[in-house]
Image (cartoon, helix red, strand yellow):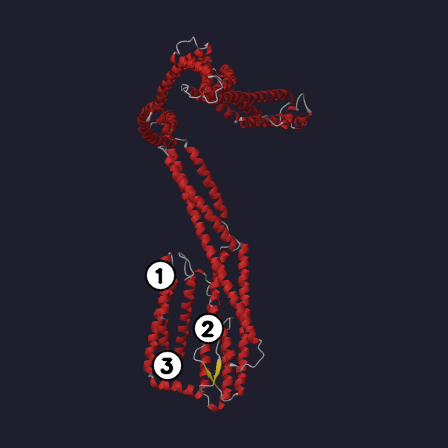
Amino acid sequence: MVVEPAAWAEVLSVQGGGAGFMGVAEAAPAGAMTQQPQEGFDRSVEDAREWMKAVQERLQVNDNTQGPRAALEARLRETEKICQLEPEGRVKVDVVLRAAEALLARCHEDQKPQILARLRDVKAQWEETVTYMTHCHSRIEWVWLHWSEYLLARDEFYRWFQKMTVALEPPVELQLGLKEKQWQLSHAQVLLHNVDNQAVLLDRLLEEAASLLNRIGDPSVDEDAQKRMKAEYDAVKAKAQDRVHLLERVTQEHAHFQASVDEFQLWLKAVVERVSSCVGHKSQLSTKDRLSALQQLKKLIAFPQDPQPLSDSVVATIQEFQRLKAKTSRLCNAADVQLWQRLQRPLQDLQLWRALAQRLLDVTASLPDPPSIHTFLPQIEAALAESSRLKEQLTILQLKKDLLGGVFGQERAAVLLEQVATSVRDRDLLHNRLLQRKSKLQSSLAQHKDFGAAFEPLQKKLLDLRIRIQAENGLQRDLPGKQAQLSRLQGLQEEGLDLGAQVEATRSLIQDNPNHQHKMDQLSADYQALHRSLEDLMDRCQQSVREHCTFSHQLLELRHWLAVLTQKLEAHRGYLGPWDAQSREAEAERLLAELPEKEAQLPLIEALGRLVMEKSSPEGAAMVQEELAELAESWGALRLLEESLQSLVRNQQLQRTEVDSGKKMIFTNNIPKTGFLITPTDLISRHHRRARPLLREGEGSHEDFSQLLRNFELWLQVENSKLVRIIAMKAATAEDLRTRETKLQELEARVPEGQHLFENLLRLGPARGSLDELEDLRYRWMLYKSKLKDSSLLLTGSSPGEPTGFQKTPRGRGLGAFCRKVCCVALPLQLLLLLLLLLLFLLPVGEEHRSCSLANNFARSFRFMLRYNGPPPT
């Protein structure tokens, strides 16, 4: 509320030449004082005083509790705004304080008392202003709260008054029995007791109204209003008292009548006993006495008007009985008439209600403005409540069909029930129309509510959703984290859809207000942008999850295959028995034949691994890198095991060759990826293999071979061009992906055709001058098939909108591409080795064993060159 005490103490300690600023003043030379601190101090003091003066003027304008409630509430809001300006005033006082400190540090001693006096004046004025602000706001707020409490109590009193008026308005219902009348009297006494209890609340209300009248002077709490409340309460109390008095009189009369009836019944019982004693078989009277008694009873019946032979009490009882009988007849007729009128009253009330409901429907046919809706909506609700009450009364009449028939007769009861049924149908129709009209008015009223009440929650939800989406825009470590992130994004997407539905539903509240329309358009645009960003984030997350799942699955399969194959190869290598069994060699070659196919999967797994690393956190990328390194290490160990096993197989073959001189050595026509293998056979001799190409050479001519060579070269060139164009395609949509896949399948379907052409070339057999050309064509054909297979694997895994696998990952071709480059560079050396191997076939038969050993040496050298991974030899 005020400036810091330490600051005030520091300034106000300079009094009468205090020591706080004496040292500063003495240390400062006289020429250091300038006019600028004095001007700053004067300006800050003037600003502070002007601000406090303006605040006090505003407080004086609003420092009044007289007038209507709306004006008081407006003054309360204004004083609250003024109280919120207190920090601004504190800042101005702080500015004065700092200016005074600067001035006191440079001024003369004779000027300090004047400056400190002005500071004390500013402080006093500031404290007065703050106190005035607090007291003014508190006083107005207390009066407003007092008035609110009074209005709540007054509304509660009038609700009780309305309820009591409704309870006392209908006349007293006629009851048949004494017990029912006593219950009715007890209920009326309870109502009167309730009225008496409300006197305390009324006195408090009158006291509060008198207290408020002195403070606000509003006509709603003046003496006329107080007298009106007192008169209304007295009227309700008088009604309750009159009802209690009436029911007490009726109950007393019925009790007196019931006592007279009981007395007459006792007399009649005594007379019946006397007659029974005179005429019964067990009578002990003599005949003369019985005749005398019967004669007296006969005279009593024949001449009831003669009171002489009767006792006075019997005559009085008979006369009272006749009187009560006549009165009872009159009361029964009156009760019949009153009961019929009472049963007709709900029908009459329904007629009045029907006219009122029809007028309400006619008036509210066209939707009025909000003030009119506030006027007619309570009337419609009251009419609906009255309709429900009438429905209950008419339903009770319909349930008392048998009772009505016994009291009024079947004809009158049937007529009455028919009228009730017709009235119920009419009431139901009007009731439904009133319900529809009420719903329509409430809907119209809801559309006129404050736009901010519906707009601000939507804006907060949108901001919260944006913050949560930004929190999810991060890379995850592993696959479970990515799946959890995707699940959270799906939940946010559902919340976003719900928010969009709420935004669209709020548009119906917009009237012809351009400001509201602009805000709603801006909110909708922000929502659409957030929705698009959320969809993009979900797409990226789904793609990342799919890629990670594919990578994990393929890596797991390849690891399992490596473990199984390593175990099997270790078993073959650890076999200590002789290697002359053809089945064991075939099994080893079959296992090693799976390596090229699995080796082709390595670049794909590496490419998938790099994609996963790009879309994972640094920790996750390190984990994927470790997995790929482990896979490469396992693959290298498998390669070493393969070389060891092949070396063992070759040694065993050489031993068998030296032992069995009758076995012949030939070279296979096809060169496997792992290098040349020289395999023995017992079925075909070297002479038969030498004779077969001579026979083919005699059958085909040189011209046919040249023609077939040109045709195959042309076909291979066309197919290779098509494959290059397919690889260069960019798939922007899923349709482009399907088109590219279809074209690749067409190229694969034509591979058997090329294989047939190539086999025709081999069958004709080339001349010696065309051997290099044929070997080059063989290499190009194998290169085309390998490229087609790699394209099928990599291109089908690329997503729409991205380049092909060869363009996306420059290192995707991996080890296979590097080996092909090495083969291309070492092609002349390979051709030279092939020529040397061909010369081995032409050696004499006598040098068979020596030529086979040389051929094996050349084959080992050639296989080593094919597996060479370093730079090309020079």
Instruction: Specify whether 18 is left or right of 751.
Output: right
How far from the left and from the top, in percent, is residue 665? 48, 85
Percent x, y for residue 184?
46, 21
Please state if 769 lies on the left or on the right of 192 as rendered: left
* Mark 1 or 3, nearer chain start: 1
Q: Is residue 599 above or below residue 693?
A: above
Given the image, on which type of amino acid does mark 1 rest? Answer: Thr
Q: Say what secondary structure mark 1 lies in.
A: helix
Residue type pointed to by label 2: Cys
Q: Which residue is identified by label 2? A: 823
> Residue 83, can we see it?
yes
Say above or below: 744 vs 448. Answer: below
Which residue corresponds to the image point at 36% horizontal and 82% vertical from the top-left?
A: 764
Question: Mark 1 or mark 2, which is nearer the start of the sequence?
Answer: 1
Cα distance, mark 2 to mark 1? 33 Å
Residue 124, label in figure: none
Between discs 2 and 3, the one toward the N terminus = 3
Q: Which residue is mark 3?
A: 763
